[in-house]
Structure formats: C-alpha cells, structure tokens
Amino acid sequence: MAVVDFSNAILDVYDNTKKPMTVTDYMKLGSSSYLYDEQGQPINSNNTMSILSNTPTKVSILYTGAFISSGTSFHTDQSQWKVTNISFSSGDSYAFVIDIEVSGST
C-alpha cells in the first residue's frame, strides 16, 4: 500500500464534446466523492470529499480515500472531469485538492 503521487496529475474535461462547459457542468466537480474507471465502475472506498475553503473567488475541495483497483486515470461522478498522468494500485491511499478559481461579476 502506498500514497498516490498527484504532483504530475492532469485535470481535464472527461468528454471533449461537452466543451464549452456550462456553469452546471463545472459545479458537478464537487457533487460526489466517488471515482470511476473508464467503464464507469467505482474504484475507491473510504472516500470523502470536504470543502476546505469557499470564497466568492475560490473553492478548494479535498478528496481522500483508497483505490480498490489499479489504473492510470479516473473520472469523477457524472463523468464530467478526468484525472490522468497518475498511477495507482488497489489498496493505495490518496489525498488531493482541486482548486476552482473564478473571476468576474455576479
């Protein structure tokens, strides 16, 4: 069992046909703590998602848990976002933060 290294991870839109994304699509990033493989099967356990900070210009979301399978990528709930350029095995734990920064007026 190891801790997964996210230092070179890449966060991108899972389905490139959905660009440009709507505000609703962006907000789905924090809708669930489950992670999925390419076939849509859950690949994590003991998973949590916590909002570390929430300001008018930035939200930071912490994901923690353990993988129950091996792979090099995953996508979040609702298939909106994917994380690539990583490597994990069953039993590996993870903790990563995704920062969402916004600008403009409401």
Image (cartoon, rainbow, N blue to C red):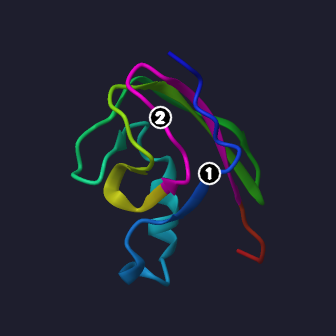
Mark toward the start of the polypeptide (2 vs 1): 1
Look at 78% across and 72% down and name the residue there: 103
Look at 36% across and 82% down and name the residue there: 17
- Element at label 2: loop
State the image quarter where residue 3 is shown.
top right
Look at 28% across and 37% down and name the residue there: 42
* Residue 97 part of the magenta-drawn span: yes
- Element at label 1: loop
* Rendered image: mark on residue 21: none
Query: In the picture provided, is 4 more to the left or to the right than 76?
Result: right
On-image quarter of the C terminus: bottom right
Spatial separation of the CA atoms under disc 2 and disc 1: 12 Å
Residue highlighted by disc 1: 9
**For the residue carrying disc 2, how many other residues have a C-alpha within 10 Å: few (<14), some (14-19), or many (20+)?**
many
Residue highlighted by disc 2: 88
* Residue 86 part of the magenta-drawn span: yes
Tag 1: residue type?
Answer: Ala
Highlighted magenta segment, given as a residue range: 83-100
**Residue lying furthest top:** 1
Q: Which residue is nearer to you in this view: 5 or 31?
A: 5
Measured as percent of width and height from the top left, residue 15 is found at 37, 72
Query: In the picture provided, is 54 more to the left or to the right than 92?
Result: right
Measured as percent of width and height from the top left, residue 60 is found at 69, 45
Tag 2: residue type?
Answer: Phe
